[in-house]
Image (cartoon, grey):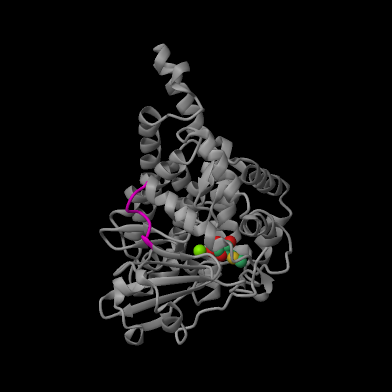
Amino acid sequence: MNSYKDFIALSPETLPARLGGLAALKQRIGADAKAWKTREVGDGNLNLVFIVEGPKGAVVVKQALPYVRLVGDSWPLPLKRSFFEYHALSRQAERDPGMVPEIFHFDAGQAIIVMEFLSPHIILRRALIAGQELPKIAKDLGLFLARTLFRGSDLCLDTKIRKADLALFADNVALCDITESLVFSDPYYDAKLNRHTAPQLDGIVKELRADRDLKVAAQRLKHIFAATPETLLHGDLHTGSVMVTAEQTRVIDPEFAFYGPMAFDVGMLLANFWMSYFSQSGHETAGNRASMRRYLLKVTVDIWEIFRDEFSRLWHGERTGILYQRSLFEDQGDMLASEQALDLVLHGIWVDMLGFAGVEMHRRILGLAHNADFETIADADLRARCETKALKLGRHLAVNRSHIHSILEVNKLAERLEKDIVT
Ligand code: SR1
Ligand code: MG
């Protein structure tokens, strides 16, 4: 339940007076709050985000609102998501140090997190739309995925700690509900808040909604999402949740965190690179994007390989949890059985990851929450051509995920779709 009675949304005008007494801010940006400059920069779907600059430095102040910002107060949303974000950031900072912003202050009642201002970082999605090839993201994100997903699971954690944590995050019901509806169900019927590029996509939308195999696949994926509390997920790991420079990668915004299937974070992230790939031809006015397309496909290959290699390294070096215990494998001298079990676990993540990637592509084109990769393509015919390719790849991944053997195979299909070789 929200306790809204004392909650007051911040504004650039009120923020200095309301937060001016906090030592955590004064130390970092300067004690005289009257000298602070505050601007609201939130462009996400849910929250307020302020950059507060003082004579000594700057911080970010993020505040949850008691409703979905994108839709308005007709869609109430618990302030407690800020509590989940705070706890998820704390755990991610332990599991992959340096990959999330540092937290300076948390106020549960006002749903406020004061954190590190990342500068000159920009949102990864914007960088990709601008055609920037970031050299470090594949390595950083592959490692982040493996470290956070492995270290938050019963492969590694003391199971008492994991179960207590599972109970803590189990209350993030409203944010899970958003994903359960918006990702897995709404795109596949005429849900109220859906929208798509019309009339250009009307035909394929009708086809997809009448596609029995796809509907079953999406519901099976929803089943896995809702009923597999395997590890602490970021829960919303798209390219809008990553900030970058050429040298640094940081993951932000884990308010959707909960205990779910490892494959979800991996699949959502890769889907966003495949969507970026298909969107590039919509951004070619200022120059050819062939190199960018090659780069994006290489990122998907590298993320998966780095994830798999790091996961394997952790399997061998940090498998201290109750699952696949060493006493049954390595301690018996049975290294082959340990490798067989690792292959089995990775294969399960692989198959489901593809499915999650497929539905993520669909929901960004057919559902409520679209992405800027496609939305910023002003020419609706061109946008629809880009979106159609992503919809087709998404359908293939969701339905045929058990029969796909490598990222290269996925990328070959992506290239064929891009060149209009397959329809
Ligand atoms: C109503 S919220 C829509 C989307 O925004 C968030 O970033 C999540 O991706 C959610 O699905
Ligand atoms: Mg977000």
Residue 369 to residue 305: above or below: below
Pick whichever, 310 or 66, lies toward us: 66
Residue 191: image x %, image y %?
73, 64
Q: Quadrant of residue 304?
A: top left
Left or right: residue 163 compared with residue 73:
left
Most common SS among magenta residues: loop
Of the 4 image quadrants, the one containing the C terminus is bottom right
Please say whether residue 292 is one of the residues in the magenta stretch. no
Residue 145 to residue 204: above or below: above
Q: Quadrant of residue 317?
A: top left
Residue 394: image x %, image y %?
57, 52
Pick whichever, 237 or 170, lies toward us: 170
Left or right: residue 11 compared with residue 21:
right
Residue located at (32% from left, 83% from top): 32
Residue 339: image x %, image y %?
42, 23
Any part of residue 353 in sight: no
For the image, the number of numbered tags is 0
